[in-house]
Image: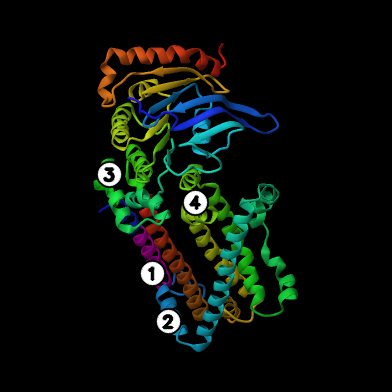
């Protein structure tokens, strides 16, 4: 077995062991069922919940909010990152703000966002966007910084214009960093939206989990939590596998 | 031997000054005539402006004063048609296979697919990369990646090839073998070659003429005719004349190298 395969097996075995241990602890009463449901019950609860129109509606609301926030964050982060890269003075001014951005709890802006956009999906999209866009912007700057100068000289040697240099040389060279930005943006958008729904919404998965918690409805709460967890892990795994294929092509994985 | 026609590329009074609060006079004035089919090498102390010379000749950097012509036409603003450049650093595109790397320039000029395939096959075979056509640069050694870059330049059939320390990162044995490859390429293509190198033995082995540059601002302080025949290869390093040429290069360069190190 190769080293990589051993690592994958070890990862799966560790995760599975933890789940089995929790199942055992819950079943033997070591962990009270009122506090944590056994994983097998979480799974059956999740499957049952996903067959109800109400939960499916909440899933659709949350996923569409995340998708909007994510798409806007990637587009804006990439555009402003590119612009900022071309404006070194502006970048010097903004760099300290970017460096300290994630120390700001963006949820404090929710009242402002409601005042700006009204009580609808937009403040949540804005929260997801604010959480995700800087990650894409920083990754874009990093990616463009790391394009080897010699490749730009090769582009000049081939007499490529600005546009073709960007498409044929700069973008492919920056792609690994851009991909990191896309991955992070999705994760931050997901976190921003779900957390926003917890405290600020009257619908969506975050709201449903909070409502179930306040109603002592453990089955719904853990079923939805498991669904959120699996959705986040799955989307990240899909992007990681895409990234892995990209890196393998470059012989770096 | 040098070609019959002179003045394939001509530099007259070329200088390069990098502007700024403290302008840096990096090069010149330089006068140089490269004959058609000549193999000319440039040696000089670190920071003497060798690469700047290549940049201005390639059209990658404008000269501050003076004129540069290639095949009678002024070089200004962009790399002229017929000029190929191979850089010191690994300049292969890591996201493209060897085949796609080599075909890069040809696809950009919209050449017919069959002609691209023919030229790419030839260049890949010529550079000994046939078994690696589908590999990515990261799967190749440093020497092989540099061969990919040379092949990418070669397919464009340049009449003037500018090489900026292309073997700088390679070990001595690989350098000697790559030198042989370069001489073979030079003989087969008939191109004029200007090689920037810091290795005196490399310059002495490969060149028809070697220009020795002074410390900054770089000017030619000696031009050495090697007198080698066109069918030479790396075995000439064991000839007595090779030692004489290398010694002359070093004697011209020693004082300048000491100046560059701050020791006069």
Question: Which residue lies under the disc numbered 2?
Answer: A47
Instruction: Give me the disc on residue A24.
Output: 1
Please rate how many residues cluster around mark 3, counting C-alpha atoms within 10 Å: few if below 14, some from 14 to 19, many from 20: many
As drawn, the residue found furthest toward the bottom would be A53
Residue A54: percent from the left, percent from the top?
53, 87
Between A75 and B68, the one lying in front of the other is B68
Tell me which chain the residue with mark 4 is part of.
A
Tell me which chain the residue with mark 1 is part of.
A
Q: Which residues are magenta?
A: A11-28
Asked which secondary structure carries label 2, the reply is helix
Relative vertical location of residue A90 with respect to residue A187 in this rendering, above or below: above
Residue B231: percent from the left, percent from the top?
26, 27
Please rate how many residues cluster around mark 4, counting C-alpha atoms within 10 Å: few if below 14, some from 14 to 19, many from 20: some
Q: Is residue A253 something one can see in this rendering?
A: no
Please rate how many residues cluster around mark 1, counting C-alpha atoms within 10 Å: few if below 14, some from 14 to 19, many from 20: some
Tell me which chain the residue with mark 2 is part of.
A
Between B25 and A70, the one lying in front of the other is B25
* In front: label 1 or label 2: 2
């Amino acid at each position: 077995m190769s080293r990589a395969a051993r690592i994958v097996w070890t990862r799966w075995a560790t995760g599975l062991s933890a789940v089995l241990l929790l199942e055992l602890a819950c079943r033997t009463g070591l962990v009270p069922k009122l506090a944590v449901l056994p994983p097998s019950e979480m799974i059956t609860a999740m499957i049952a919940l996903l067959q109800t129109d109400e939960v499916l509606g909440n899933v659709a609301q949350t996923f569409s909010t995340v998708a909007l926030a994510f798409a806007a964050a990637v587009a804006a982060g990439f555009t402003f990152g590119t612009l900022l890269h071309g404006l070194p003075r502006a970048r010097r001014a903004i760099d300290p703000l970017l460096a300290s951005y994630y120390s700001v709890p963006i949820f404090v802006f929710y009242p402002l966002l409601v005042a700006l956009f009204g009580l609808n999906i937009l403040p949540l999209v804005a929260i997801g966007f604010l959480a995700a866009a800087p990650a894409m912007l920083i990754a874009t700057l990093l990616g463009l910084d790391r394009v080897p100068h010699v490749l730009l000289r090769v582009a000049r040697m081939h007499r490529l214009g600005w546009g073709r240099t960007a498409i044929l040389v700069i973008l492919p060279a920056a792609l690994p960093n851009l991909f990191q930005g896309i991955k992070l943006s999705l994760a931050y958008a997901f976190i921003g939206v779900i957390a926003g729904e917890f405290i600020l919404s009257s619908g969506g998965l975050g709201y449903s989990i909070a409502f179930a918690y306040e109603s002592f409805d453990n089955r719904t709460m853990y079923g939805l939590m498991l669904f959120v967890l699996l959705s986040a892990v799955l989307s990240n795994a899909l992007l990681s596998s895409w990234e892995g294929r990209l890196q393998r092509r470059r012989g770096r994985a | 031997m040098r070609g019959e026609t002179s003045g394939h590329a001509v530099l007259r009074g070329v200088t390069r000054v990098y502007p700024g609060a403290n302008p840096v006079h990096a090069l010149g004035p330089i006068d140089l005539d490269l004959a058609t089919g000549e193999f000319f090498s440039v040696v000089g102390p670190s920071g003497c402006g060798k690469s700047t010379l290549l940049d201005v000749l390639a059209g990658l950097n404008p000269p501050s004063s003076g004129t540069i012509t290639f095949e009678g036409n002024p070089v200004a603003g962009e790399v002229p048609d017929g000029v190929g450049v191979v850089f010191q650093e690994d300049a292969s595109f890591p996201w493209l296979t060897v085949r796609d790397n080599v075909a890069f320039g040809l696809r950009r000029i919209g050449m017919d697919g069959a002609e691209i395939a023919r030229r790419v096959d030839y260049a890949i075979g010529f550079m000994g990369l046939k078994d690696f056509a589908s590999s990515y640069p990261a799967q190749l050694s440093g020497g092989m990646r540099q061969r990919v870059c040379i092949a990418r330049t070669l397919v464009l059939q340049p009449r003037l090839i500018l090489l900026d320390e292309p073997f700088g990162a390679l070990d001595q044995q690989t350098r000697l073998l790559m030198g042989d490859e370069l001489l073979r390429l030079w003989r087969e293509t008939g191109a004029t070659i200007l090689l920037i190198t810091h290795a005196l033995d490399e310059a002495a082995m490969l060149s028809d003429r070697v220009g020795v540059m002074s410390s900054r601002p770089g000017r030619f302080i000696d031009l050495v005719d090697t007198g080698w025949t066109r069918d030479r290869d790396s075995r000439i390093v064991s000839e007595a004349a090779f030692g004489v040429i290398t010694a002359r290069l070093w004697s011209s360069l020693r004082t300048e190298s000491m100046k560059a190190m701050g020791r006069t």
